[in-house]
Structure formats: C-alpha cells, structure tokens
Image: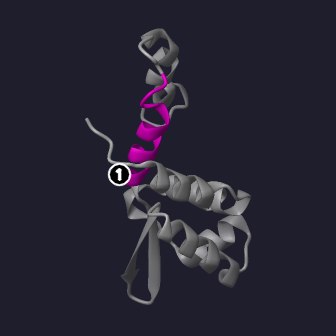
Amino acid sequence: MGFDMQLPDAVDSLSALAHASRLAVYRLLVRAGSDGMPAGEIARRIDVLPNTLSNHLTILDRAGLVQSRRDGRSIIYSADYDRMRDLLGFLIADCCGGRPEICAPFVGIAEEVGCCA
C-alpha cells in the first residue's frame, strides 16, 4: 500500500493538530467513526464556543483532516481516515532504515490501544 502524502501536506496536517482544542476535536471525530458528529455536539463535548469551534474546524478542513456534510439544518463533521492513514504512513515510512526491529512495536499499536478490536 502506497502513501501519497508529501512533506508540505504532512506539515499542514501536523500544524493543524498542534493545538490542544483541535487535537481534541480530531480525536473525538476519529472515535465517532464514519457517521461523524454534528458541530453543536462537538462544541458541547470539548466545551468550546461555537464560533471558536468553527475556526478550529476550518483549520482542520483546510489541512484535509476532516470532512463535512449537511444533514437537514446540521453540519456533520467526520475524520478523513484516508488522510489519517497517509499521515501515519508518512511518519513511519522510513523509520526502519533497513532494520525492521525498530518498527516492529508499531505493528500492534492499534490492537494495543483497543481501537480496532
């Protein structure tokens, strides 16, 4: 499986996540799954004002980390799992340097944290 992310895109994604509230939003949306979550619920869950959340979501959207869709009067946000996969792949793509034992611990992380059981 190839990863399409290049350095400028990785920097954009990591910059967007380099804020406590945006990281909290993103982690919440990753946990919410592909169904996503309405903006109002996100604001309540991370305890931010709607206009502040809007700014955070705009930054995450520009970085390609979230997607949005309209559902009636609500806007539903969800994590872009392809972008997350590409970012994670970019971060570990060259970690081994020809020594697979260096990356071996990363193989089971998803299972270890219980996200994919």
Residue in the image at 47% along x and 31% along y: 92
Q: Which residue is mark 1?
A: 82
Q: Quadrant of residue 56?
A: bottom right
Q: Amino acid at mark 1?
A: Asp
Residue 83 x %, y % = 40, 53
From the image, give the main secondary structure of the stretch colored magenta.
helix
- Give above or below for 1 relative to 11: above
Q: Is residue 5 magenta?
A: no
Residue 13 x %, y % = 53, 56
Q: Name the quadrant of the C terminus.
A: top left
User: Left or right: 62 with respect to 1?
Assistant: right
- Give above or below for 6 relative to 111: below
Q: Crowdedness of circle 1 by 10 Å Cα count: few (<14), some, many (20+)?
A: few
Residue in the image at 57% along x and 70% along y: 59
Residue 110 x %, y % = 47, 31
Q: Name the quadrant of the N terminus.
A: top left
**Of 13 and 46, which appears nearest the observer?**
13
**Of 69 and 114, which appears nearest the observer?**
69
Give the residues drawn in magenta, as a range: 81-95
Q: Quadrant of residue 34?
A: bottom left
Residue found farthest to the bottom: 73
Q: What colouring does the structure picture have?
A: one colour
**Of 49 and 89, which appears nearest the observer?**
89
Residue in the image at 32% along x and 47% along y: 4
User: Left or right: 103 with respect to 56?
Assistant: left
* Secondary structure category for the residue under label 1: helix
**Total of numbered circles in the picture?**
1
Residue 74 x %, y % = 46, 84
